[in-house]
C-alpha cells in the first residue's frame, strides 16, 4: 500500500491540480524502456534501419554513384573493367554458344558493383530499388492485414453469435486454401484485369495488387488470436462496468477492448512484415507478384536463376537481403513481444 | 420512505448443456426503499451476484419485472437504459478486474462523465479531482495506472466511478470480499460516509454475515436462487425465522463476552447445496433442513409475512409465528 488514505477527506475547495511527483509511466512507455534493454532486438532494429535507409537512397546510388538506369535493358552497352572496355553482355562461349553471360561483380561501387543481370542492368541498383518495393509491400500489406484483422477479430469476439459465426467461417474458408496456391490464383486473375470492386479500383500491374492479395490471405492468421483475446476480455468486470455506465458497444470496443488488444497487434506487425515480405518474394519469384520492369528481391532472385552457374552473385545477394531482413524483423518482433508482455516470457532472463 | 426499486418474481436462467438450464435466480421479489441499505447474503453460487446484475439490468431477465423509480426497466434496450444509468450504478467484487489495466485511475473515473456529457474537459477534470477527494484518494493518484494501487485503493476508484454521476441506487456486489480485513473496515466506513453525504441507497451483496450486519438496515437471505427470508437486520440476527438463516447465523463464531448471555446453538447442515441445474421439488432447502416435513418435499413455500418479516418456510421457527397456515 502506498498510502494510508483517510476514509473520507472533507470536500475541499478546488485546489490547483497537483502534478504527480513522479509522472506515471504508461504501459507503452514501460514497454519501450524494456525494449531498449533488449540487446538483440536493438541490434536487429539498427540493422533494419540500415537496410531501409540504403533502399531509400536507391536513386542516389543509381544517379550519383553508378550513373545507371536500373529499369532499361542495356544489352549492347559496354563497361570498363580492369582498364579494358568489355561488353556488359558477352556472348556465351560454353556449350552451344547460346545465351549471354553478363559481366560479373567488379566490387567497384561506381561501376557494376555486383555485376549486371541478363539484360545488362546494374544488379546493385536493382537490388536497392527492389528492396524498396519488397519493404514497401511487406510493411503496407502488414499494416493493411493487421488493420483488417483487428476490426474483424474485435467484431467477431465482441459480438459473438451469428456475427462471429459468419466471420469465423470466412476465416476458415481463406485458411482452408494453401497460402501460396490462393495467392497465385488471386494474382493470376487480378494481374491481368486489375481489381474493380465497388469504389476500389486497382489497375493491373500496380504495386497495390500484391499488397492487397498478401494482406487478405493472412487476415485469419492475425484475426483468429485477436478474436480469442477479445472473447476472454468479454467476461472481464471492467467491460461490464463500462456497460453499466451506459457506454455504447462502439465505445466499449474502442475504449476498453482496443487498448487491450493493441499490444498483440503491435507484436504481429514486424512478424507479419517479415512473413509478407517473404510471400511477396515468393510470388515475385514465380512471376505473379511485382511485374517487370519493376524490381523486387523476389524478381531479382528469379532473374539470377538462369545465371546461377555463371553469375551466382545475383541470386545470392538478393536472397541474403530477403533473409537478413526477415531475420531482423523476427528478432525485433520477439523483442517487442517480450517488452509488451513480460509475464508471457517462456525462457528465463533479465 | 418511498420505494426506489422493486423486483417482482425475477427469474434468470442460464443455458447449460443438454437443453437444461442453470436456475441462477428463481422467482425473487424484493423492494428497496429510498435511503436504506438492503443486505443480500447467501453462500457462493446462490445467485446473489446474478440478482444484483438483474436489478440494474446489466443482464436480461428470463422473466419477472424490475421497476426503478416506478418505471418498468425490464425490457428496456441498452440505449433505452442509458438515460437511467446515472441513477443506478454498480460497484464490483474484484478490484483487480473491474478497472481497465490500460487506462489511468483518473481516466476510469472520468469515463461516466464523458459518456453522459458532464461538461468540457476542464469541468470533468475538476469533478474527477473532487471525487478523488471524496473517496479518500489524492490528486497525485489521478494519472496512475491500476497496477500501481493496492486493492483497497482500487476499490475506492471503483466507488468514485460509481458515484460520479450522483446515483440514487448503488448495487455493491461483494465490494470488500477481495480485500484484507483491515482494509475492509476502511472501505465499509467509506460506504457509510458516502451514504450519509449523498443520500445513497445501497443493495449490498455479501457472503460475510458480519459485514452485512454492520452495513444493512434490512437483510435478504438467499438460498439456491430464492429469497428465503427478509427482515430488519437486528431482528434477523436476534431471532432468525427460516431454518437456513438459523444455520447460517449459528456458523458465525461468537466471542464469549463474559456476560453469560445464552450462546446460539450450533446447527450443522448436512449435505451440499443442490445443483441449481437440478433443484429439489418443494422447498429447495428441504434435503438439508433439520425441520423438514412431508409437505416441504412437495410444496414450494411462498414468501409470506410472518411477525413483521417475510419468510419462505412452511414451518418457521420464530416464537410467536404461526406454523403452517
Image (cartoon, coloured by chain):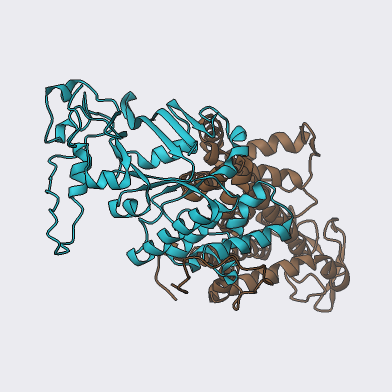
Instruction: From the top left corner, tell me how far across and down residue B34 is, in percent.
Output: 49, 42
Q: Quadrant of the N terminus of chain A?
A: bottom left
Residue B164: tell me if it is visible. Answer: yes
* Residue A76 found in image quarter: bottom right
Q: Position of B28 compared to A223: left or right?
A: left
The number of numbered badges drawn on the structure is 0
Where B261 falls versus B16 (above or below)? below
State the residue in front, B15 or B236.
Answer: B236
Instruction: From the top left corner, tell me how far across and down residue A100 is, in percent.
Output: 75, 57
Q: Identify the residue at horizontal 63%, vertical 42% (top origin).
A: A250
Where A323 falls versus B234 (above or below)? below
Q: Position of B275 compared to A170: left or right?
A: left
Q: Identify the residue at horizontal 14%, vertical 64% (top origin).
A: B258
Q: Quadrant of the C terminus of chain A?
A: bottom left
State the residue in front, A8 or A348.
Answer: A8
* Residue B178 found in image quarter: bottom left
State the residue in front, A341 or A113.
Answer: A341
Where A264 falls versus A3 (above or below)? above
Q: Position of B23 compared to A233: left or right?
A: left
Q: Identify the residue at horizontal 38%, vertical 65% (top origin).
A: B183
Q: Colour of chain B?
A: cyan
Residue A225: tell me if it is visible. Answer: no
Instruction: From the top left corner, tell me how far across and down residue B142 is, in percent.
Output: 59, 66
Q: Identify the residue at horizontal 58%, vertical 31% (top origin).
A: B77
* Residue A201 found in image quarter: top right
Q: Colour of chain A?
A: brown
Instruction: From the top left corner, tell me how far across and down residue B163 is, in percent.
Output: 55, 52
Amino acid at each position: 500500500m502506498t498510502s494510508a488514505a483517510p476514509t473520507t477527506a472533507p470536500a475541499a475547495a478546488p485546489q490547483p491540480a497537483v502534478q504527480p511527483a513522479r509522472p506515471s509511466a504508461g504501459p507503452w512507455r514501460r514497454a519501450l524502456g524494456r525494449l531498449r534493454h533488449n540487446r538483440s532486438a536493438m541490434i536487429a532494429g539498427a540493422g533494419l534501419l540500415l537496410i531501409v535507409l540504403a533502399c531509400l537512397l536507391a536513386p542516389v546510388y543509381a544517379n550519383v554513384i553508378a550513373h545507371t538506369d536500373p529499369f532499361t535493358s542495356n544489352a549492347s552497352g559496354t563497361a570498363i573493367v580492369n582498364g579494358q572496355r568489355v561488353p556488359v553482355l558477352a556472348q556465351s562461349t560454353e556449350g552451344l554458344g547460346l545465351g549471354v553471360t553478363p559481366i560479373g561483380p567488379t566490387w567497384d561501387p561506381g561501376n557494376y558493383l555486383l555485376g549486371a543481370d541478363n539484360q545488362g542492368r546494374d544488379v546493385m541498383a536493382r537490388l536497392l530499388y527492389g528492396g524498396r518495393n519488397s519493404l514497401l509491400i511487406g510493411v503496407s500489406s502488414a499494416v493493411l492485414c493487421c488493420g483488417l484483422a483487428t476490426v474483424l477479430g474485435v467484431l467477431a469476439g465482441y459480438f459473438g453469435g451469428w456475427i462471429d459465426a459468419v466471420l469465423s467461417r470466412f476465416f476458415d474458408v481463406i485458411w482452408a486454401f494453401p497460402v501460396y496456391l490462393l495467392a497465385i490464383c488471386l494474382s493470376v486473375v487480378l494481374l491481368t484485369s486489375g481489381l474493380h470492386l465497388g469504389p476500389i479500383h486497382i489497375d493491373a500491374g500496380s504495386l497495390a495488387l500484391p499488397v492487397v492479395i498478401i494482406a487478405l490471405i493472412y487476415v485469419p492468421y492475425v484475426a483468429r488470436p485477436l478474436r480469442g483475446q477479445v472473447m476472454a476480455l468479454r467476461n472481464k468486470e471492467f467491460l461490464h462496468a463500462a456497460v453499466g455506465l451506459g457506454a455504447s458497444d462502439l465505445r466499449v470496443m474502442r475504449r476498453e477492448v482496443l487498448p487491450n488488444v493493441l499490444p498483440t497487434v503491435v507484436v504481429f506487425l514486424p512478424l507479419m512484415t517479415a512473413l509478407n515480405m517473404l510471400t511477396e518474394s515468393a510470388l515475385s519469384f514465380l512471376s505473379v507478384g511485382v511485374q517487370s520492369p519493376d524490381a523486387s528481391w523476389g524478381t531479382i532472385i528469379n532473374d539470377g536463376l538462369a545465371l546461377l552457374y555463371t553469375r551466382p552473385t545475383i541470386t545470392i545477394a538478393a536472397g541474403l537481403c530477403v533473409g537478413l531482413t526477415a531475420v531482423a524483423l523476427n528478432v525485433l518482433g520477439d523483442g517487442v513481444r517480450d517488452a509488451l508482455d513480460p509475464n508471457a516470457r517462456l525462457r528465463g532472463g533479465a | 420512505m418511498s420505494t426506489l426499486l422493486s423486483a417482482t418474481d425475477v427469474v434468470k436462467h442460464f443455458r447449460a448443456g443438454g437443453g437444461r438450464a442453470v436456475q441462477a435466480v428463481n422467482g425473487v421479489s424484493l423492494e428497496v426503499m429510498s435511503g436504506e441499505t438492503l443486505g443480500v447474503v447467501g453462500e457462493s453460487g446462490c445467485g446473489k451476484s446474478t440478482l444484483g446484475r438483474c436489478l440494474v439490468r446489466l443482464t436480461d431477465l428470463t422473466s419477472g419485472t424490475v421497476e426503478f423509480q416506478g418505471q418498468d426497466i425490464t425490457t428496456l434496450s441498452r440505449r433505452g437504459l442509458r438515460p437511467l444509468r446515472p441513477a443506478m450504478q454498480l460497484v464490483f467484487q474484484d478490484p483487480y478486474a473491474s478497472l481497465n489495466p490500460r487506462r489511468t485511475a483518473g481516466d476510469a473515473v472520468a469515463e461516466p462523465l464523458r459518456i453522459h456529457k458532464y461538461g468540457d474537459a476542464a469541468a470533468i477534470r475538476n469533478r474527477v479531482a473532487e471525487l478523488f477527494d471524496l473517496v479518500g484518494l489524492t490528486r497525485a493518484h489521478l494519472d496512475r495506472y491500476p497496477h500501481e494501487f493496492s486493492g483497497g485503493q482500487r476499490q475506492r476508484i471503483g466507488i468514485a466511478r460509481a458515484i460520479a454521476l450522483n446515483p440514487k441506487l448503488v448495487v455493491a456486489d461483494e465490494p470488500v470480499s477481495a480485500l484484507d480485513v483491515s482494509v475492509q473496515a476502511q472501505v465499509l466506513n467509506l460506504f457509510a460516509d458516502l451514504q450519509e453525504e449523498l443520500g445513497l441507497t445501497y443493495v449490498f451483496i455479501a457472503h460475510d454475515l458480519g459485514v452485512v450486519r454492520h452495513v444493512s438496515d434490512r437483510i435478504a437471505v438467499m438460498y439456491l436462487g430464492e429469497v428465503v427470508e427478509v427482515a430488519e437486520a437486528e431482528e434477523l440476527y436476534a431471532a432468525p425465522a427460516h431454518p437456513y438463516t438459523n444455520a447460517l447465523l449459528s456458523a458465525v463464531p461468537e466471542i464469549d463476552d463474559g456476560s453469560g448471555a445464552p450462546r446460539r446453538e450450533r446447527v450443522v447442515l448436512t449435505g451440499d447445496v443442490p445443483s441449481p441445474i437440478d433443484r429439489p421439488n418443494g422447498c429447495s432447502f428441504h434435503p438439508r433442513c433439520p425441520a423438514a416435513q412431508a409437505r416441504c418435499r412437495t410444496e414450494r413455500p411462498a414468501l409470506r409475512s410472518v411477525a413483521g418479516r417475510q419468510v419462505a418456510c412452511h414451518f418457521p421457527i420464530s416464537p410467536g409465528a404461526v406454523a403452517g397456515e
